[in-house]
Amino acid sequence: MNSIQNQQPRCGLSSFKLKGLGTPGESPEKSPEGRMEGRWPARGGVLLCLTISLLLQGRGDSFAINCSGFDQHGVDPAAFQAVFDRKAFRPVTNYSVPTRVNISFTLSAILEVDAQLQLLTSFLWMDLVWDNPFITWNPEECVGINKLTVSAENLWLPDIFIVESMDVDQTPSGLTAYVSSEGRTKYDKPMRVTSICNLDIFYFPFDQQNCTFTFSSFLYTVDSMLLGMDKEVWEITDTSRKVIRTQGEWELLGINKATPKMSVGSNLYDQIMFYVAIRRRPSLYIINLLVPSSFLIAIDALSFYLPAESESRAPFKITLLLGYNVFLLMMNDLLPASGTPLISVYFALCLSLMVLSLLETVFITYLLHVATTQPPPMPRWLHSLLLPCTSPGRCCPTAPQKGNEGLGLTPTHLPGPKEPGELGKEVRPGETELDGGSGWTKTQLVELWVQFSHAMDTLLFRLYLLFMASSILTVIVLWNT
């Protein structure tokens, strides 16, 4: 018995007989009407057989695997030899019918997301399922065998590829495929895929990315191959979440699909496009970037409570500013190499606030220096604005509220540690020297300008807090959106 029974249409010469012809072996006779009756000529039978064979082209052959001897010697490779010889051709019995290939995949690892090159590197298993009508057998005659594993090199394989892939296919050799008794072929292919992905890093490190895997055929159009789903999308998502191996920077959110057609010239190709949504785990960046930066900017804000006359206030702010710059240089490797993420705007904002804080300290220090050395005459409108700040409970809580009530002045004892005689001497009963004809002595002018300096310090501090709070809240709202 042959390994494979090839059942083809047979053309027997004795099988064809015209009306009025005799049986084979009889001599032709003439009918009463003078017509010739007899056998169909052998030559004509050959021509008719050839014509029928040509008409039946494209229907192909029906193969059935002969399982004799499987129970004694195992599977005989010769039983599949005729199928292996056809691996270069699409396995169909009618070439006008397209082959349907069902696709699914399992995302098992997200290896790398390169924001600079806009590339996603992942590892997945691609599952392909199709029918091969040339591989069928009766399980009852084959010792109950319902499924076999066959080397993929001996079978026809659909040329399915990922359109976004930017790397050479490095599929390992020696893979096998499952073949059922009905001819259903299942082929699992491991792939390390480096694909193009449009990455938006503006919301880094709280960003979500949507990448696509588009499966399509390289050669076969919709007339020869149609693509379908082997599993539902929710099954692919659940399986990928369960088997994903990396617990690093990225996590899988979900998978969706679309089925567009791809037109190349006059050819139309079938496609299945999967949308893979991933999200970055921000804990690493919160601990290493946001928390230290927030601590430094908070300490800079608290430094305003140091006395304005203190000589350590400006050096303290300079030290904070230098430390923040060193921090940014050390943490630069954690930031994306391209684009302008929102966290970079946040860092630039914090740095600007520190610089403004230092400039404010320099300005207040200059005012105090001028007030204690060469105080200029104070305009009346400025003095009228300063009067409310000298009342109790107003914007200058640190300035003493005792002294000359008529001018809103304080005693010569100013806030903060000072040397005796630093701000001028007390007004003696006989002192009548006025400064510039303004009606105030030099000591009173010193006290007025010192009060003005403290008022400006408090005002700028409140503006600083308002600007810092509004800016940080804006950044947080943008991150949440």
Image (tube, rainbow, N blue to C red):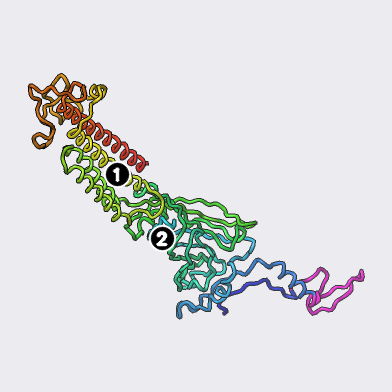
The nearer-to-camera label among 2 and 1 is 1
Say which quarter of the image contains residue 82.
bottom right
Residue 166's mark? Answer: none
Q: Amino acid at mark 2?
A: Ser
Residue 320 visible to the viewer: yes
Q: Secondary structure at mark 1?
A: helix
- The location of residue 93, given as percent across then percent down, is 61, 66
Q: Nearer the viewer, residue 357 or 127?
A: 357
The answer to if 18 sits in the magenta stretch is: yes
Q: Nearer the viewer, residue 290 or 243?
A: 290
Residue 144 visible to the viewer: no
- The location of residue 222, given as percent across then percent down, is 60, 57
CB of mark 2 within 8 Å of CB of mark 1?
no
Q: Main secondary structure of the magenta part?
A: loop
Q: Residue at x 63, y 64 (%)?
A: 95
Q: Is residue 288 above or below residue 392?
A: below
Instruction: Answer with left or right where residue 58 lies relative to residue 168.
Output: right
- The location of residue 73, given as percent across then percent down, is 46, 80
Instruction: Answer with left or right where residue 83 lies relative to residue 373.
Output: right
Q: Nearer the viewer, residue 131 or 65?
A: 131
Residue 350's mark? Answer: 1
Q: Which residues are magenta?
A: 15-43
